[in-house]
Image (cartoon, grey):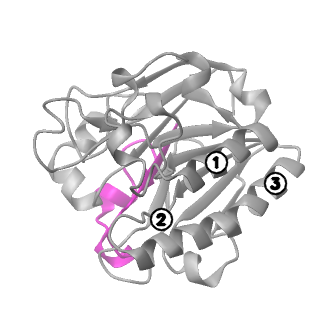
Amino acid sequence: MLRITSLNLNGVRSAANKGFYDWLAQQRADIVCLQELKAQRGDLTDAVLRPAGYHGWFHCAEKKGYSGVGLYARTPPERVVEGVGNAEFDAEGRYLRADWGTLSVISLYLPSGSSSPERQEAKFRFMDVFLPHLAALRAEGREIVLCGDWNIAHKEIDLKNWKSNQKNSGFLPEERAWLTRVFDDQGWVDVYRRLHPEAAGDAYTWWSNRGQAWAKNVGWRIDYHVASPGIAAKALRAGVFKERRFSDHAPLTVDYDWNL
């Protein structure tokens, strides 16, 4: 069995202070994908760089306190690739790929467009760059799992207040249509939805810090395992961990009938 966990940390040092690494030590995850490190390589302690039992790889943003992705693995990969080959977005630390045999696992952090119109335009630029990249990944013929914060809720079932968010970043018609192209045109699989097609509130992975969103479970499902069909068919179970909070996101874990 292969257990893969993904979590947007909203700051690795903050999550560490909230007990993330104590929790991780008990989870028996084989691969862990992290997003939004908000740290430079020099800021990372040995406990973050090399948690007990894991090897770690990181793609930090050039801007301090911003973005960045990471990946832990119990078995070292044969190859690690940072970035998608686009200067604008590779400088933001949004993509880290690791290869084992016929399998690739990618930690991914799509831009958020919620802070300003300029950032929404950047998000659209990323989507334009990333769609052909996804097609190229599929053409490799490998089994691939892209784990991370996609910053898009795909369908109405994927967020609590969908009616009032149709003009907000993360649920714009253009964003949702783009994700439909990823699934329907290119053949990628939303692994959680394959296992839990009707799940609503239990599926949410992010809650705003405003109001009482967490207490009232006014959430969004914007963190995904997006996989090629072969390994998606090997998914056994998926769950969102909500008993403790390390971030404004919750960890998403999927077990696959697969061996590295």
In x, y percent, where is residue 169? 42, 58
Tell which of 223 and 143 is nearer to you: 223
Dot 1 amino acid type: Ala
Quadrant placement of the N terminus: top right
Dot 2 amino acid type: Pro
In x, y percent, where is residue 93? 50, 71
- As helix, strand or loop, the secondary structure at mark 3 comes to helix
| As drawn, 145 above or below 117 | above
Tell me how far mark 2 sits from mark 3, CA to CA.
19 Å
Q: Are marks 1 and 2 in contact (CB under 8 Å)?
A: no
Quadrant placement of the C terminus: top right
Q: How many marks?
A: 3
Q: Which residues are magenta?
A: 31-54
Q: Which residue is mark 3?
A: 135
Q: Which residue is mark 2?
A: 111
Q: Which residue is mark 1?
A: 177
Q: Are marks 3 and 1 in contact (CB under 8 Å)?
A: no
Tell me how far mark 1 sits from mark 2, CA to CA.
17 Å
- As helix, strand or loop, the secondary structure at mark 1 comes to helix
- The residue shown at (69%, 69%) is 129
- Which class describes the residues within 10 Å of circle 1: few (<14), some (14-19), or many (20+)? some
Tell which of 121 and 64 is nearer to you: 121
Q: Are marks 2 and 3 in contact (CB under 8 Å)?
A: no
